Image (cartoon, rainbow, N blue to C red):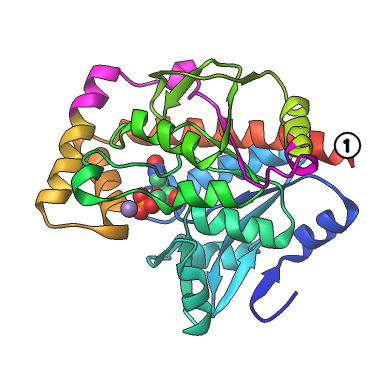
């Protein structure tokens, strides 16, 4: 524990005991990720799924100039209200500037998880290569962080407002191991099949734990992306999603948005365009990812 990195007491105790811990990002639970009150409901469902699976949740963020890993109840409330979105590169400047409340993306959370010694992280969807990236250059820092931090990240793939094929190509170039959770198709968030195949499928937490150990022994110091398709009963209609997502991204660009503002704007547009139909789907997949992450964290704890 330092002035810069605060590890919550329950998380610190669990890590010292070698028990299962799962990191959580705070952007998805702020209003940048989900509208109120769905953001709180989503957090509660995710935490309950982790607890059922025997894992301690470690919500990450920045509060009063310190990076937090394992927010307590009062800190969780403050993070729900956060509106400053922090990628990995923003962590150091947020600490130096004594930022009061900052919510962490996948790249920042993977960085904090690794710094705290947490090996598993559950989220909804990761960032990726945006459609039209050949002009905008917009590629999420999440991909680079996945390559750099030796953490297992469980996600439902990427949202279809991103270019799924280019994102998969970039993951390959960066050397990120991608494992399909009981699937051989790369999922696209609201739909179970994003249209691309996967080379590796796993069936349980032990296989992921073994892959992480092997990567460490063999010196492949990068993260592992576990892609878990949205539960079938929560899946949305592909044609409907395709139509609204491509428009949402175009609209954000036309409105002159760039950088970190694009993704939250597109997410809000999707809620609006689907009359909130995306919200229960988002919660269902986040909860499902938490259950998978807990199983992986439990398998890693067992190996220790
Ligand atoms: N995709 C979602 N919900 C989210 C995000 C992405 O469906 O909340 C957030 C995550 O925090 C992710 C970040 O790490 O957006 C990526 O932002 P950008 O595209 O600016 O890198
Ligand atoms: Mn971006």
Q: Quadrant of the C terminus?
A: top right
Which residue is found at the position 26% from the left and 26% from the top? Answer: 241
Query: Which quadrant of the view contains residue 190?
Result: top left
Q: Examine the rendered structure and indicate whether residue 97 appears above or below residue 129.
A: below
Q: Quick check: can you spot residue 37? A: no
Judge from the rendering whether residue 181 lies leftward or rightward of residue 230; answer left or right: right
In x, y percent, where is residue 253? 15, 50
Could you tell me if residue 127 is visible in this image?
yes
Picture coordinates of residue 54 (x, y %)?
78, 39
* Residue drawn at x 68%, y 40% as measured from the top left: 50
In the rendered image of this protein, does residue 179 appear above or below residue 175?
Answer: above
Residue segment shown in magenta: 215-243
Compare residues 216 and 239 and report the one nearer the observer. 216
Question: Is 44 located above or below residue 179 in the figure?
Answer: below
In the displayed image of the protein, which residue is found farthest to the left? Answer: 254
Taking 68 as reference, is 107 left or right?
A: left
Whether 217 is drawn above or below 77: the answer is: above
- Image x and y of residue 216, in percent: 76, 43
Quadrant where the N terminus is found in the figure: bottom right
| Quarter of the image where one finds residue 71 | bottom right
- Near-viewer residue (80 or 285): 285
Q: Which residue is mark 1?
A: 303
């Amino acid at each position: 524990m330092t002035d810069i990195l605060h590890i919550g007491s329950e998380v610190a105790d669990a890590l010292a005991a070698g028990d299962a811990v799962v990191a959580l990002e705070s952007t998805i639970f702020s209003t940048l990720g989900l509208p109120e009150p769905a953001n709180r409901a989503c957090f509660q469902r995710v935490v309950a799924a982790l607890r059922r699976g025997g894992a301690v949740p470690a919500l990450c963020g920045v509060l009063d100039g310190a990076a937090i890993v394992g927010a307590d109840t009062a800190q969780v409330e403050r993070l729900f209200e956060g509106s400053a979105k922090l990628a990995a590169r923003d962590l150091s400047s947020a600490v130096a500037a004594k930022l009061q409340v900052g919510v962490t993306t996948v790249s920042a959370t993977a960085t904090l998880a690794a710094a705290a010694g947490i090996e598993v992280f559950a989220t909804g969807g990761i960032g990726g290569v945006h459609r039209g990236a050949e002009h905008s250059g917009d590629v999420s820092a999440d991909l680079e962080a996945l390559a750099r931090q030796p953490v297992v990240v469980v996600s439902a793939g990427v949202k279809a407002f991103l270019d799924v094929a280019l994102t998969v190509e970039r993951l390959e170039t960066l050397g990120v191991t991608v494992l399909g959770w009981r699937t051989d198709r790369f999922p696209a968030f609201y739909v179970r099949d994003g249209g691309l195949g996967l080379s590796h499928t796993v069936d349980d937490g032990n296989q992921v734990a073994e892959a992480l150990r092997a990567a460490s022994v063999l010196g492949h110091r990068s993260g592992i992306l576990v892609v878990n398709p949205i539960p079938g009963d929560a899946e949305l209609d592909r044609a409907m999603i395709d139509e609204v997502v491509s428009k949402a991204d175009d609209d954000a660009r036309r409105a002159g948005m760039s950088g970190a503002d694009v993704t939250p704007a597109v997410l809000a547009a999707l809620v609006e365009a689907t009359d909130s139909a995306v919200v229960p789907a988002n919660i269902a997949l986040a909860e499902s990812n938490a259950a998978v992450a807990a199983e992986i964290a439990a398998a890693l704890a067992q190996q220790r």
